[in-house]
């Protein structure tokens, strides 16, 4: 496969261009079924994310978290920011559908996909102009990621086998970061369980090129303040 021009991939381009590369997520419920929108509409949440300066937005369409394809379609009508679809994507038709719904990137969960399927789906994404957002939890899964230099690769700090009901092990991200970088991915990401601005600042300082956050941002009330606190915490770390 030939190397693609990154400028044709809006999700990756936006993440790489951002000084605060936090992918802000629209997620209706947490893994325990607790509502996260608190009476807000998706429009209100997306507007707050835009005001905060989010480079891109993730939309959970998976039913475990109360999502739906209609939610992605709705969010796509509300913003021009590049969108990531988070769902269990296992078939090429779902990639075509993601694009139709308005996504610029799709989640591919390495733990759920045989290596040959992951490879075909990554190829399909790249041919379709979607950024493959490949989530891994181990070094073995990471080694099986094809065309890593054209994928966003994210360490999932939570455990998909328990439906992500755990609080997340951020040590997994830190431990896997050198191996992540060695793949040549332009954007190593830490995803899930990032519990606040101080943790986010620490992960960005450690060298992550992006973070994916839902629960903490949605519970914080003001995403703009949350991101300001990340900047403040980073300044504090630089002064040490
Ligand atoms: O991780 C998956 O495989 C997955 C598949 C389908 C829908 C959602 C999925 N994961 C959940 C998430 O991606 C989290 O919502 C996201 O990482 C944010 O986590 P948090 O900040 O802890 O709410």
Image (tube, grey):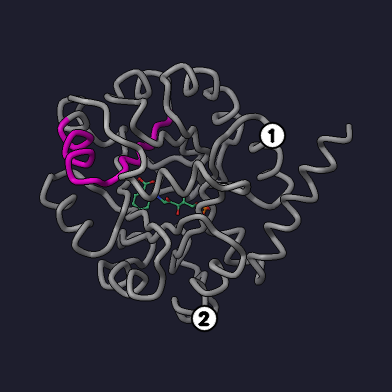
Identify the image quadrant of the C terminus. Answer: top right
Which residue in the structure is indicated by mark 1? 205
Q: Nearer the viewer, residue 209 or 163?
A: 209
Which residue in the structure is indicated by mark 2? 40
Q: Residue at image x 52%, y 83%?
A: 39
For the residues bearing labels 2 and 1, Cβ distance under 8 angstroms? no
Please tell me whether mark 2 or mark 1 is closer to you in this view.
Answer: 1
Q: Position of residue 48 (x, y in %)?
A: 57, 72
Q: Residue at image x 85%, y 42%?
A: 236
130 with respect to 75 (left or right)? left
First in sequence, mark 2 or 1: give its number. 2
Q: Quadrant of residue 61?
A: bottom left
Magenta residues, start to end? 120-137
- Magenta-colored stretch includes residue 110: no
Residue labelled 2 has its Cβ within 8 Å of some atom of ligand 1: no
> Element at badge 2?
loop
Q: Residue at image x 23%, y 64%?
A: 101
Residue 131, placed above or below residue 238: below
Q: Position of residue 35 (x, y in %)?
A: 49, 72
> Element at badge 1?
helix
């Amino acid at each position: 496969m030939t190397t693609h021009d990154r400028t044709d991939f809006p999700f990756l381009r936006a993440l790489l261009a951002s000084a605060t590369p936090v992918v802000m997520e629209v997620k209706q419920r947490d893994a325990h079924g607790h509502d996260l929108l608190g009476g807000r509409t998706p429009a209100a949440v997306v507007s707050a994310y835009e005001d905060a300066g989010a480079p891109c937005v993730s939309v959970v369409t998976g039913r475990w978290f109360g999502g739906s394809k209609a939610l992605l379609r709705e969010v796509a009508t509300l913003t021009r920011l590049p969108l990531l679809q988070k769902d269990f994507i296992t078939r090429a038709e779902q990639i075509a559908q993601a694009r139709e719904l308005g996504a610029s990137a799709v989640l591919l969960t390495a733990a759920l996909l045989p290596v040959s399927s992951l490879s075909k789906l990554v190829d399909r994404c790249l041919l379709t102009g979607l950024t493959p957002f490949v989530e891994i939890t181990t070094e073995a899964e990471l080694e099986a990621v094809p065309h890593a230099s054209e994928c966003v690769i994210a360490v999932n700090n939570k455990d998909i086998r328990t439906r992500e009901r755990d609080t997340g092990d951020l040590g997994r991200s830190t431990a896997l970061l050198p191996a992540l970088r060695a793949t040549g991915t332009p954007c190593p990401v830490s995803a899930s369980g990032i519990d606040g601005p101080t943790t986010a600042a620490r992960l960005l300082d450690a060298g992550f090129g992006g973070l994916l956050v839902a629960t903490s941002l949605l519970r914080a009330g003001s995403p703009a303040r949350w991101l300001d606190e990340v900047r403040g915490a980073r300044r504090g770390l630089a002064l040490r």
